[in-house]
Structures are given as structure tokens and as C-alpha cells.
Amino acid sequence: MFTTEYNIEDFREAARRRLPRGLFDYIDRGNEDDVALRHNRSAFAKIKLLPRILAGVGDRDLSAEVLGHRHSLPFGIAPTGPAGYVRYKGEIELARAASRVGVPFILSCAATVPMEEVIRDGSDGAKWFQLYLSGDRLLSMRTIDRAWAAGFKTLVFTVDSIVSPNREFAARSGYTVPPRVRPGIVLDAMLSPKWLVSTWGRYMLNGGLPQMMNYPLPDVGSIGQSAPPLKDDSIDWETLAEVRAAWPGKLVVKGVLNPQDAVACAEAGADAVIVSNHGALLFDSCVSTIDSLGPVVDAVGGRIEVYLDSGIRRGSDIVKALALGAKAVFLGRATLYALAASGESGVVRALELLRDEVDRTLACLGVASISHLSRRHIAAAP
């Protein structure tokens, strides 16, 4: 099949052409002045790799063990709330793509598809569930029970999103999640007819506008001043202990940047942490994830696994993170662009492009296996 996408930036441009302008900005931009968004990328660009020659690496192994399971690649798909807005039931397409390629997929609790349906229709790709705690603590804890009953084996507890982000551009355009129908939104949608028919049109024919089907709120269709808040800024280390006690499976804490916090997560019984600044959506003055990774890895000293998300656009970015100690990385915008552009097939294509880039980078480094990567492959700063 003919394709015009040869890297993640190509998928980004394809998504930009297909989506309404306001929706594309919603998935593409960060918050405030987009400083952290740019820094996530520039920090990766500053890191240089040190090749070795004549290493005899004709047979390369890209597989990685994550939480005791062997996956075909050292990366997976991060939770992305807007997946169901850029594509009809996009969460299922992400799960299927992950299953086809053999990588983990984390379902967002802000998904538009019930978690039970994603497990049923998404094949083996949907075994990780991401949780926010809302202002309704009791319902939040019941959501944990629901996820386990549905068949999820790993809970990803996101701890860095406790207040609403200052996304001024979204306030101007009127885009919200869940969406609200406004004149400007309707006009914007009409300028993107393919998306309007294939995504919004299908929702309207099948029950109406999509809503967050797994978020711990009593009635996600009528969020108002009397309803519990979407975020809970009172969560603390006792909250983590409560979540740990309630969840029988593997527990991953997402949103860690400070080494001291990573150590505390390990002591609290977490199985892994994700070094993440939420794709630069929340805090425009925060440190980049790749700059935070090494200190976090050093601090935990192998007691728990460490992953990374935010800022990944190339296979070489993935290799840099692995060389600095990450066991795996998770892709947010990269797969969201591909989903918006071409659905499940686009996500598979994006994952395969990144796989080929990782493989090519390993060959250039003279490394035969992902497990052989270390900081000796990072060139010293001049």
C-alpha cells in the first residue's frame, strides 16, 4: 500500500491536515508558552551517541523485558485522553495496533470507550490501565476494582496531574475534553469533512457525543459546579499506599521527575515509575524528562524499573533513553498523530518506523542487543 509517511513528523503533518485546527492544537501543543514542549525535544537533540565499528552485529535483538514480560520492542503506547476524539473509538485501534506489533498499551481512564470493551476488542494490547484520582475518592477506588475485574494486570497511577493545566490556546478556541458544541467548534469541524463524517458523524449515529467512560466521576455527562472536581490536589504518600493496598497487580507511578520521589515510590511498593512531565501539558517551567532520567535511575539503584515518556520522536531518542537506564519508553503524541492520520494501520506503521530506527541506531553503535546499551554509548559533553 502506498504511503507518504516515513517518520513521525510526516504523521504529524497528516494529522494536521485531517483534524480541525482546534483539535489538532489540543493534541499538538503544551501549555502557556510551550517552553517545556520545546525543551523536551531540544534536550534529546543535545545528547550525542558514541558509535563503535567492526562489532559484528548482524543479528540484533530489539526485545525488552518489562515487568516480567518479554515484549518484541523496548517501547509502548502511553495513555492519551484525546484518542477517541481524533478517531472513532480510537482507543481500540491503539490497543489492536499494540497487539499486532507486540508492545504494551496503556489505556487512559479518560478514554471514550469502556475499559471492558477495550479488553474485549483490543486483543492482547490492552492490559495496562491508567488512573487519575478525582474528587470522588470512593468512586476512584472502585475504579481500581473495576479495572482488575475487567482483566487489566498493570495499574498506572498518574500523580503529576492534580490541577487543570493553563492551556490558554484551548481556552481561546473553545476545545475541551469532553467536548462542548459551540458555534466556533462546529465551523472548525465543517472545514475538516473527512474527520467530521468518519469520527464525529459515527458518534452521533451511535448515541451522541463521546464522553469519558472510565473516569471516576458519578456522572461524566453532567459535570458541573456541584459535581466532584476532575482532579484531586490532596493526594499524598498515604494515597499511594492506599492505591498499592487496593491493587493486586503491578503498580506503576507516572509523573516522577525528582529522584527523591522515585525512591519514595520504591519504598511505597511501586513496581516501576515513569519519568514524565505529562508531555509538557501541565507545567511549562518543569525539567525535561531525558534530563531527569539519569538521576532517577541512579537514585532507585535497580530496586524498581524506570521508564520514560514525553518528547520521543525518533528511534535514536528511544536508544538514548535506554542507554541512560530506562527499561522502556512510552509514546504519546507520536502514536496519537498516526492514529489521527490513518487509524490502526497508521499506528502500526509508526511503531514499525520507530522499530527500524532503533535497529539502525543499534547497528551504528555496534550494539547487538537492547540489553547491552549503557551510558558508555553516550558521548561525553565537550
Image (spheres, rainbow, N blue to C red):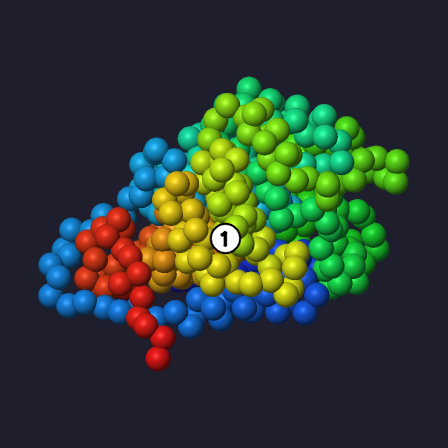
- The vertical placement of 83 against 365, above or below, is above
Q: Residue at x 55, y 29 (%)?
A: 244
Q: In this view, does 45 lie to the left or right of 155?
A: left
Question: Can residue 187 be seen by looking at this rendering?
Answer: no
Please state which amino acid type lies under the numbered disc 1. Pro
Q: Residue at x 71, y 55 (%)?
A: 165
Q: Which residue is drawn at 39% across and 61% down?
A: 317
The quadrant where residue 313 appears? bottom left
Q: Position of residue 281 (x, y in %)?
A: 63, 57
Q: Which residue is drawn at 44% across and 57% down?
A: 295
Question: Can residue 381 be seen by looking at this rendering?
Answer: yes
Name the quadrant of the C terminus: bottom left
Q: Where is residue 189 in the image (x, y as percent from the top left)?
A: 72, 55
* Mark 1 Cα-neighbour bin, 10 Å: few <14, some 14–19, many ≥20: some
- The vertical placement of 278 against 120, above or below, is below
The quadrant where residue 354 appears? bottom left
The one nearer the camera, 342 or 135, is 135
